[in-house]
Amino acid sequence: MGVASEVFSLAHLTRVDPEGAAWIRDSLAVANAILKDHGLATFVEPESLPNDWPRMHSIGGFPHSYLHTLRLAYSRARLGLRVTTEPEDVTIERVAALLDSHLLCHNIAAGFYVPVDFQYPIADSRTEQSMLGSSIALLRELRFVAPTLGIALDDTGQPSAAALEGLRNTRETDYEKIVWYRLFETASVSQHYGTAISFE
């Protein structure tokens, strides 16, 4: 089963699927209501694409099974482990149980990451899968785990030129890097343009 991370969903659907656009608009209104109820900033989802969007590097999806490898790498990094004899699922569950990771606690098959910064994922029955994530917090977690994956970041938190070239030519077996790159691109666009991440 594949996961496609999407940005500008409302802008795309407004042009081709009015009913789908209405559903996204209503769902994002719920997300904003949740943010407001938690004393957080709200956001306005763009209804048109930015002028430079067609020139940007394309964002793709990844098989859902690949996500496990990135979550394991992140969990080991959080626990200060390079290698562990624990079963992989136990390692992930130890960190996920803290309920503070946007990478681990979000379903990443439904719901949204919103372009608003908050520390903990928000559990709320009004959201799909009862969890709302922050794309800005997700970026921090991706930057945290990058050294573990051998991804060099520059002083601005972006992949270095050499790292970027390597990511664009990642081997098909480097599952965690494939997912890292897709999520990093998507979360970066989300933060820069103020658009929510949705999933298909």
Image (cartoon, rainbow, N blue to C red):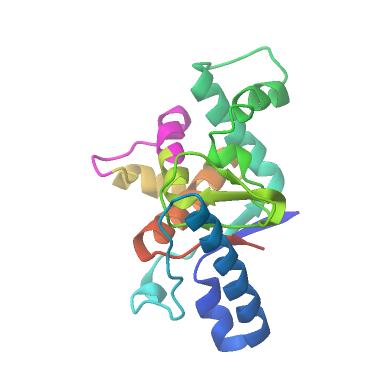
Q: Is residue 10 left or right of residue 154?
A: right
Could you tell me which quadrant the C terminus lies in? bottom right
The quadrant holding residue 103 is top right
Figure check: 164 above or below 9 = above
User: Compared with residue 42, is residue 24 higher up or lower down, i.e. above or below?
Assistant: below
Residue at image coords 50%, 49%: 38
> Closest to the observer: 121 or 39?
39
Residue 145 drawn in magenta: yes
Q: Residue at x 44, y 45 (%)?
A: 118
State whether residue 168 appears in this view: no
Number of numbered tags placed on the structure image: 0
Magenta residues?
A: 141-156
Q: Residue at x 51, y 44 (%)?
A: 180
Given residues 26 and 85, the one toward you in this image is 26
Q: Position of residue 160 (x, y in %)?
A: 30, 43
Position of residue 103 relative to residue 57, above or below, is above
Residue 106: name its quadrant: top right
